[in-house]
Amino acid sequence: MALFKLERFAEAAEEARTALAITPDDNIALRTLARSTLSLGDIEGTIAALTDLLPSSVNEAVAGIRALLRHGEVQAAARVSAVAPARIESCDSEVLPRIVTLLRQQALRKQNPAPERMAAFEMALALAPDNAALRIDFLRLLASAGEAGAFAHNAKLVTDATALADASATLARDVGNRARQAFRDQRWQEAHEWLQAGGRLGLEQAAGDLAERIKARRLAEARKVLVAKEPDSQEHTAALLADYPEDGAARSLHARALIANRHYAQAKTLLQAVSAQGAATADDYVQLARACRASQDIESAIGACFDALALRHEDPTALVLLGHLLPGRE
């Protein structure tokens, strides 16, 4: 401590580290290390020292957090506070709101780069997770930055109906614009993600007829991937099915990708579900016959062939399969 008072900060920090190597919970050494590293501009060292000080001396830690704020190190103060916000709040009811306010100011400063603004919002929300106005401000930034996944996640965390109603018009506009732009740029999955995010907030006006147009384009794209036998066809159709789990066409396309990769049992289950919902085509029944035959379910394979022929008489593939499946036929 004497070295610190003499402003020999590097030596004071080293002396404190030596003491902590012997007694890791020495509060005086931790406080000296925090103050010395802050004076040296070693903010990571200050954060580490204050974090270690929190369990045994919250008052000293809060004093260190206030010192960080005086030095303009708002995000460092937030990182320490996030370790035990309830304890800090019980010691000093003013420090957390002050940090949140300063972080919000950083986040709303448009001249700051978007990643820095998002980091400031995330830190503020870690300290004030129920602050609806703060989270809605974050949603606006996420929409303008094109972060569909983060928008959807944070949208689910808004529970204040009044705040949401007040913001719904502008959020609907932002989400709708993002979805339409992604659609124009042929980023079909991203467009779908934006509409899903809007739907979770009750922003139905952001969608219009765009949802069906997006699905049609994504189905068409998946068909092209399958025809081209792209190596990632199964991943592509799996993503499609994840977004439209009850859609017969999405199920059918993923089943075809599964058959191409010899996952016959999974394909059979999917195609049987398509048949059960009354959405199966002759091609679906041919694929079902193939999956059943490969998994040694001969009776079901024969039945699928006849179902295909009922929809498309003289279907050549179904007839060839029956030639292999029926007894006495080659």
Image (cartoon, rainbow, N blue to C red):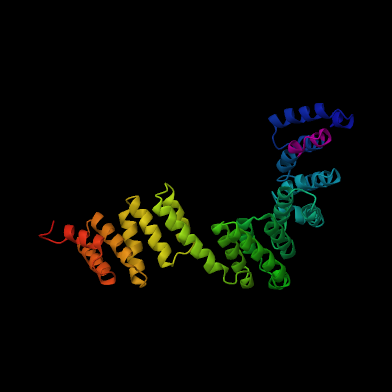
Q: Is residue 137 above or below residue 160?
A: above
Q: Is residue 59 above or below residue 5?
A: below
Q: Quadrant of the C terminus?
A: bottom left
Q: Residue furthest left?
A: 328
Q: Residue 293 location in percent, x, y?
A: 23, 57
State whether the magenta stretch is mostly helix, strand or loop: helix
Q: Residue furthest right?
A: 6
Left or right: 82 in relation to 5: left
Q: Does residue 157 appear in this view? A: no
Camera-side residue of 269 and 248: 248
Residue under the image location 45 percent in, 52 percent down? 235
Q: Residue 76 location in percent, x, y?
A: 76, 44
Q: Does residue 222 appear in this view? A: yes
| Residue 277 included in the magenta stretch of the image | no
Left or right: 325 in relation to 162: left
Q: Quadrant of the N terminus?
A: top right
Q: Residue 61 location in percent, x, y?
A: 77, 45
Left or right: 204 in relation to 301: right
Location of residue 28 (image quadrant): top right
Residue under the image location 77 percent in, 31 percent down? 16
Location of residue 276 (image quadrant): bottom left
Residue under the image location 40 percent in, 62 percent down? 251
Q: Residue 57 location in percent, x, y?
A: 75, 45
Left or right: 93 in relation to 234: right
Question: Which range of residues does the magenta coloring cover?
Answer: 36-46
| Residue 43 included in the magenta stretch of the image | yes
Location of residue 133 (image quadrant): bottom right
Camera-side residue of 18 and 325: 325
Camera-side residue of 64 and 287: 287
Camera-side residue of 139 and 32: 139
